[in-house]
Image (cartoon, helix red, strand yellow):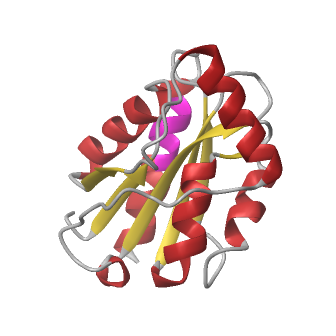
Amino acid sequence: MKDVLCIYYSRSGKTRQAMEDIAGALDAELVEITDGQDRSGWKGYLRSGMEAMRTSTRPLQPFETQRPLEEYRLVIVGTPVWAGRCSSVIRALLKRRGLELPETAYVLTRGCQRRYEEIYEQMDGYIAKPHALACSLRVDDVGYEFWRDKFLQAVRALLDQ
């Protein structure tokens, strides 16, 4: 399904793992984005949380997709949860290019039990129409595969319509 784009940011590798799993299962294009900031270690962790709380963003590094964003049937946006919000890198993408996204779905990766579903509405504020699907995943958690597969099933059903 090369008409599906999985685009994401990952600081620790957890979001990368989830998005690689999802893109592989859907045979979708996979693109990682960054703003070029060093977010490693505890300083990077603190910096990332502060940016998320302030809702500040930095310019993104250039990235390429196989086609213009508006030509995909579905764009799946993957982000880690930072301080109860989407990452500042994904916020930058949505602020700058969100109106170009056609149908969207969200994948949140989180480190705790809380699902943070209110983040979906935060992200919807930057796109033309509300998201079609979303899931909140804890990579390495017992329920990860169940919720990932449930999301994949919903994506396939949406694309079959």
Q: Is residue 149 magenta?
A: yes
Taking 9 as reference, is 118 above or below it?
below
Left-right relation of 5 to 35: left
Residue 159 at what x, y percent from top left?
A: 37, 70
Q: Residue at the spot x=38%, y=60% of the render?
A: 156
Q: Which residues are magenta?
A: 146-151
- The residue located at (57%, 56%) in the rendering is 58
Magenta stretch: helix, strand or loop mostly: helix
Q: What is the quadrant of the C terminus in the image?
A: bottom left
Q: Which percent across, then down, holds residue 81?
A: 67, 38
Residue 123 forms part of the magenta stretch: no
Which residue shows up at 51% across the image and 43% down it?
150
Q: Residue at x 21, y 63 (%)?
A: 1
Quadrant assignment, res 92: bottom right
For the question of whether residue 76 can be seen, the reply is yes
Q: Is residue 155 left or right of residue 138?
A: left
Residue 135 screen position, x and y as percent: 60, 46
User: Above or below — where is 122 with respect to 12?
Assistant: below
